Image (cartoon, rainbow, N blue to C red):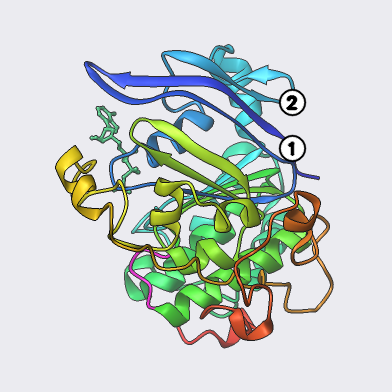
């Protein structure tokens, strides 16, 4: 289950504004990837390009042999059925209750009977811990519940690829920890290919199998979590450790004088690499790798203290039962 998403030489401008150039990466089938980047670097534009809502100027996005960037509308319609998308605010229809919102894609895209639809909707509501809230309107529930309802809706067509835009925006750290655990548990259950766009460094360090960083109109790096968390590359190091010292400035790149002034400042050591979150039932995900495997295979010495249980950052150790999530 899950399919590769092969992105090759992707370039996009709006008028004279170049968003990014020559973005090349493969989201491996069934794995969880996170895409990071300063505001405005085109992370949402990338998500929209992957589902064919935005056409790139150059490059391809190959899914099961079909190029989303250049295929016919008919092929695009078919390929889109492989996707589930969770938008930032859940993108619920305000006048429909949660049941009808979650049922919407099934009524639009399938010929299933109402009783089949009911079974699927209730199964997905259960997965995200929303049983009992089916008849609530989106306006009557918290932001965290809206996100989970959006997730249930993204799951009803059994997606092979799940795109998730800033799931933690507007959530407090505890709700963010619950939703992170939900992603890990879901991935273990459905094996889909996940791409999560986030600004949350804590989530980035503990959830994904792979991390990408968009910066200065290109893909600065994409690869296994341990590769980026042990990287000394200045932009990657600065961003993944939320530091002020480094090439990224307040609103743009630092200029030569600012960088020269920082030259003699010692960089803080790389923090330990935390353990990756595991499914709450203790059964490893299909694509989960043992802690430190990438570092060992590539002869990289991880920062001292890495992979110790006490090196886990905040979300580690939260055994989430979504039904008990207080939001
Ligand atoms: N349809 C569009 N037409 C013109 N410009 C657009 C369009 N969509 C996005 N942009 C521009 O593309 C740039 C990147 O936007 P995008 O929302 O992808 O950034 P982002 O990295 O997701 O930012 P944030 O982290 O703040 O959400 C912005 O300057 C935005 O104004």
Task: Provide the secondary structure element on which disc 2 rests.
Answer: loop
| Residue 137 rendering spot, x and y as whole percentages | 39, 68
Q: Residue at x 43, y 51 (%)?
A: 87
Kindly identify which residue carries mark 2: 64
Task: State the residue in front, 210 or 162.
Answer: 210
Mark 2 CB near ligand 1 (8 Å cut): no
| Residue 93 rendering spot, x and y as whole percentages | 38, 54
Q: Residue at x 23, y 16 (%)?
A: 15
Task: State the residue in front, 269 or 227.
Answer: 269
- Residues packed near mark 1 inside 10 Å, few (<14), some (14 to 19) or many (20 plus): many
| Residue 203 rendering spot, x and y as whole percentages | 51, 66
Q: Which residues are magenta?
A: 168-172
Q: Is residue 39 magenta?
A: no
Q: Quadrant of the N terminus?
A: top right
| Residue 153 rendering spot, x and y as whole percentages | 56, 55
Count of numbered marks: 2
Q: Quadrant of ligand 1?
A: top left
Q: Is residue 104 left or right of residue 44?
A: right
Q: Is residue 39 left or right of residue 301?
A: left
Q: Where is residue 294, by image quadrant?
A: bottom right
Say if residue 55 shows up in the picture. Answer: no
Magenta-colored segment: predominant secondary structure: loop
Q: Is residue 121 above or below residue 58?
A: below
Say if residue 235 shows up in the picture. Answer: yes
Q: Which mark is residue 185?
A: none
Q: Is residue 65 above or below residue 108?
A: above
Marks 2 and 1 close (CB-CB < 8 Å): yes
Kindly identify which residue carries mark 1: 3
């Amino acid at each position: 289950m899950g399919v590769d998403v092969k992105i090759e030489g992707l370039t996009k401008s709006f008028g004279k504004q170049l968003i990014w150039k020559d973005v090349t990466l493969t989201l491996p089938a069934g794995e969880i990837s996170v895409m990071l980047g300063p505001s405005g670097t085109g992370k949402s534009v990338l998500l929209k390009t992957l589902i064919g809502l935005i056409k790139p100027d150059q490059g391809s996005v190959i899914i099961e042999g079909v190029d989303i960037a250049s295929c016919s509308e008919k092929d695009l319609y078919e390929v889109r059925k492989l996707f589930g998308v969770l938008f930032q605010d859940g993108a619920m229809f305000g006048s429909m209750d949660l049941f009808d919102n979650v049922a919407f894609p099934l009524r639009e895209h399938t010929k299933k009977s109402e009783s089949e639809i009911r079974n699927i909707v209730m199964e997905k509501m259960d997965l995200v811990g929303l049983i009992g809230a089916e008849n609530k309107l989106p306006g009557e529930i918290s932001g965290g519940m809206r996100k989970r309802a959006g997730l249930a809706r993204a799951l009803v067509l059994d997606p092979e690829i799940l795109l998730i835009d800033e799931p933690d925006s507007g959530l407090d750290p505890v709700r963010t920890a619950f939703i992170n655990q939900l992603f890990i548990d879901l991935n273990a259950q459905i094996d889909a290919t996940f791409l999560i766009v986030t600004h949350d460094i804590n989530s980035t360090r503990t959830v994904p199998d792979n991390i990408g960083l968009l910066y200065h109109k290109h893909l600065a790096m994409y690869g296994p979590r341990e590769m980026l968390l042990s990287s000394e590359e200045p932009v990657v190091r600065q961003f993944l450790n939320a530091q002020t010292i480094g090439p990224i400035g307040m609103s743009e790149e630092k200029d030569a004088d600012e960088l020269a002034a920082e030259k003699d400042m010692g960089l803080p050591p790389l923090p330990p690499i935390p353990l990756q979150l595991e499914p709450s039932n203790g059964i490893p995900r299909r694509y989960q790798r043992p802690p430190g495997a990438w570092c060992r295979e590539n002869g990289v010495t991880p920062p001292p203290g890495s992979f110790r249980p006490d090196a886990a950052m905040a979300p580690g150790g939260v055994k989430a039962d979504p039904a008990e999530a207080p939001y």
